[in-house]
Image (cartoon, coloured by chain):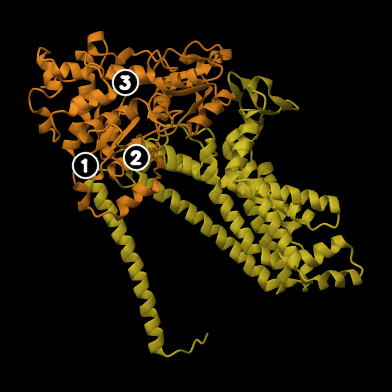
Chain colours: A yellow, B orange
């Protein structure tokens, strides 16, 4: 598109867009003011003031300190973190699993190819809710607390969850994560500086060993220098359940497994499609040059296949985040169960709670889209 | 003919109504709307045995259902002119306040917070309940405090989460919760040992226990930790409609008190020697029905077609039913219960 347009044309285009924007804003204003008026006429309380009130309900799994004495705002934060945790775990697991299944699907080995094909078809053609109920049923079929399966006496699995050893000082975990992030960042800056100075060495320059070292070394260094004393706490059976350590509740396990397996089947198909989209001639050329099939895949096919994968994988990730709201079916306290469920019910402020939930999902999705777009852009610059 | 309308209200519908409807239109009288529409739109739970459930013949049955049927009989002359809409714990009050339903008869508790914040009005108590607990018999739990550190299965949106915190939190006892919205999944999780106890309205627990395959494996604890006065809600601001629903319920209670049943109501109405209380109730004396905006036969039709409160209770929860919930507080005041209708005169 030409940038040298007549000022008149540009002005009219700005005016048109401004008009549309004003129209949209007016419709939104009309809807919200109408709703506010309706609520007032119906004597329904409105506003977000309830967020600072005491929540008064328990959330069984929380990454941060939470008691029923905390506020509705804190309950919202707990729900949000639970949603993010399940989403991140499921995205990682689904990507690994889906990648493996997709690669197996294009394998030359007949058995592996058929097996993974059957797996994908089975996983993909069962609705997610059925996956969820099935996994939840399976987790609940584990032995009870008194007959927990134990691994070396420190890890316990039963139908009330997976009990793992955890750091005694919970706040250390946050600091550790922060230092890991900082270490990675420092290592990245270091790599960039070094690459800028040194000679150009093609695409082969590998940053990840340096990044990993940064992520591991900085926390260790800080720990060694500080007088902090971190101890592991092993779960012990007491009363109705386990004391100490951290308990991954069955609802979370079932939700993660269901989301991962269901989404892995989609990712597998995306991977297969992308790999098959690479021109046949590329394989033949690689073979002619004497590449092994593993090297062909790693060095030639996958780098070319990643580009068309990104938009579809982004969609799948977004779906995982949004589908995590199905946790409400099996009682996992994520965003929809906490703010969109119990908080909504206790305060009765449906519009505010639903708006909060919708806004949050929208924000998470936009952030994921942005990150994937940046990645996509970078890959696009590199190869094509 | 029973109208089998299994429409399911989603949360979006009432919210959309709030967004889109003109603010002034909301003030039309519910009675006129019901008459024009030819049926009472009744919001029920739809999955609560003894209160609202579709039976094996495809008919709606239960205490909550019968209240709506009585109102339809009083207002429209036919107890079958009810349109049932299943509501969830989440959308029920919004659906009522925005006019999607005319009556919310869903075993909902009467609390100050709901009246103050939700734009709804309570009619009268239709069933006195309280929050109870069911445990696994194998755990040998005798009393509630034995459950320190236990996991509880709860349904959301009911007052049970707050009640549990009020009872356990205040006593310094620890507990965990699993909150599942749908009753079948909730009870399944409890039965499979995910929770040490399940907490809900006592009547609901008793009803579920009666329908379980192995009722001996579970125990109802004697403690009741809250007051749950259940009954029908209507939208705020329509006194005419609120009076009709409230006094239809009172008429059914008065019917039991005076010994008027669906079987003898015709006989009593023709009987000139019947007491003046009965004559006023059945509309052969006075003009109460007309003052409510109905006709003088309103209570007669409700009693004739649905039966008095005692008959309704026996049919849905009484000894002949599988649920067999003792009447307890829900006896008439004459039998030392709490069912006390103001005089109809």
Q: Callout 1: few (<14), some (14-19), or many (20+) C-alpha neighbours within 10 Å?
A: few
Could you say where residue A357 lies in the image, as x and y percent from the top left?
44, 48
Q: Callout 2: few (<14), some (14-19), or many (20+) C-alpha neighbours within 10 Å?
A: many
In whole angstroms, how far apart are the C-alphas of marks 2 and 3?
31 Å
Q: Position of A137 compared to B118: left or right?
A: right
Asked which quadrant contains residue A256, the reply is: top right
Q: Is residue A72 visible in this depiction of the protein? A: yes
Query: Which label is found at residue B35?
Result: 1
Could you say where residue A289 lies in the image, as x and y percent from the top left?
90, 71
Q: Secondary structure at mark 2?
A: loop
Front one among B6 and B235: B6
Q: Position of B121 compared to A206: left or right?
A: left
Q: Residue at x 53, y 50 (%)?
A: A322
Q: Are marks 3 and 1 in contact (CB under 8 Å)?
A: no
Front one among A23 and A146: A23
The residue under label 3 is B312
Above or below, B44 relative to A265: above
Mark 2 against mark 3, which lies toward the viewer? 3
């Amino acid at each position: 598109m030409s940038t040298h347009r007549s000022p008149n044309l540009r002005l009219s285009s700005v005016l048109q867009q401004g008009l549309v924007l004003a129209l949209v804003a007016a419709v939104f204003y009309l809807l919200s003011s109408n709703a506010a008026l309706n609520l007032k006429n119906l004597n329904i309380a409105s506003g977000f003031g309830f967020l600072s009130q005491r929540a008064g309900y328990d959330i069984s799994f929380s990454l941060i300190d939470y008691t029923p004495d905390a506020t509705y705002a804190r309950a919202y934060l707990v729900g949000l973190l639970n949603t993010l945790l399940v989403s991140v775990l499921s995205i990682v697991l689904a990507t690994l699993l889906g990648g493996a299944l997709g690669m197996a699907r294009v394998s030359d080995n007949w058995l592996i190819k058929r097996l993974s094909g059957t797996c994908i078809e089975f996983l993909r053609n069962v609705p997610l809710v059925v996956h969820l109920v099935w996994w939840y049923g399976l987790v609940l079929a584990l032995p009870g607390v008194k007959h927990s399966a134990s691994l070396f006496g420190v890890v316990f699995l039963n139908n009330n969850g997976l009990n793992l050893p955890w750091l005694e000082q919970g706040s250390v975990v946050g600091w550790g994560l922060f230092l890991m992030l900082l270490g990675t960042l420092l290592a990245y800056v270091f790599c960039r500086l070094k690459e800028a100075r040194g000679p150009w060495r093609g695409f082969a320059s590998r940053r990840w060993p340096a990044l990993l070292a940064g992520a591991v070394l900085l926390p260790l260094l800080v720990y060694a220098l500080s007088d902090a004393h971190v101890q592991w706490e092993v779960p012990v059976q007491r009363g109705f359940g386990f004391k100490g350590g951290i308990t991954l509740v069955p609802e979370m396990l079932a939700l993660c497994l269901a989301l991962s397996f269901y989404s892995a089947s989609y990712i597998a198909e995306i991977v297969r499609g992308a790999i098959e989209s690479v021109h046949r001639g590329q394989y033949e050329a690689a073979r002619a040059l004497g590449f092994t099939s593993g090297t062909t895949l790693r060095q030639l096919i996958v780098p070319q296949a990643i580009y068309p994968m990104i938009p579809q994988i982004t969609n799948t990730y977004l779906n995982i985040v949004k589908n995590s709201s199905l946790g409400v079916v099996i009682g996992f306290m994520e965003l929809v169960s906490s703010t969109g469920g119990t908080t909504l019910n206790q305060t009765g402020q449906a519009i505010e709670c639903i708006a909060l939930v919708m806004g949050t999902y929208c924000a998470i999705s936009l952030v994921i889209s942005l990150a994937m777009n940046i990645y996509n852009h970078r890959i696009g610059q590199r190869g094509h | 003919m029973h109208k089998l309308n299994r429409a399911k209200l989603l949360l979006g519908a009432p919210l959309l109504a709030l967004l889109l409807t003109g603010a002034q239109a909301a003030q039309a009288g519910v009675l006129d709307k019901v008459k024009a529409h030819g049926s009472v739109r009744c919001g029920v739970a739809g999955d609560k045995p003894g209160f609202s459930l579709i039976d094996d013949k495809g008919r709606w049955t239960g205490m909550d259902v019968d209240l709506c049927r009585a109102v339809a009989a009083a207002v429209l002359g036919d107890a079958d002119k009810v349109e049932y809409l299943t509501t969830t714990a989440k959308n029920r009050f919004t659906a009522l306040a925005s006019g999607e339903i005319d009556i919310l008869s869903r075993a909902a508790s009467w609390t100050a917070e709901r009246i103050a914040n939700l734009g709804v009005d309570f009619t009268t108590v239709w069933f006195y309940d309280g929050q109870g607990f069911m445990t696994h018999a194998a755990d040998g739990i005798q009393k509630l405090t034995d459950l320190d550190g236990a996991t509880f299965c709860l349904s959301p949106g009911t007052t049970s989460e707050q009640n549990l915190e009020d009872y356990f939190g205040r006593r310094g006892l620890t507990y965990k919760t699993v909150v599942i919205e749908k009753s079948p999944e909730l009870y399944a999780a409890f039965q499979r040992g995910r929770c040490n106890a399940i907490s809900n309205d006592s009547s609901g627990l008793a009803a579920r226990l009666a329908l379980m395959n192995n009722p001996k494996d579970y125990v109802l604890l004697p403690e009741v930790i809250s007051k749950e006065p259940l009954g029908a809600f209507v939208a705020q601001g329509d006194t005419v409609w609120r009076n009709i629903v409230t006094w239809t319920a009172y008429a059914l209670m008065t019917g039991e008190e005076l010994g008027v049943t669906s079987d003898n109501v015709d006989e009593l109405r023709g009987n000139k020697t019947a007491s003046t209380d009965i004559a006023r109730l059945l509309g052969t004396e006075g003009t109460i029905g007309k003052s409510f905006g109905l006709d003088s036969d309103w209570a007669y039709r409700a009693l004739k077609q649905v039966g008095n409160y005692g008959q309704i209770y026996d049919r849905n929860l009484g000894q002949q039913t599988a649920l067999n919930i003792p009447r307890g507080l829900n006896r008439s005041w004459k039998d030392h219960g709490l069912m006390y209708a103001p005089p109809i005169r």
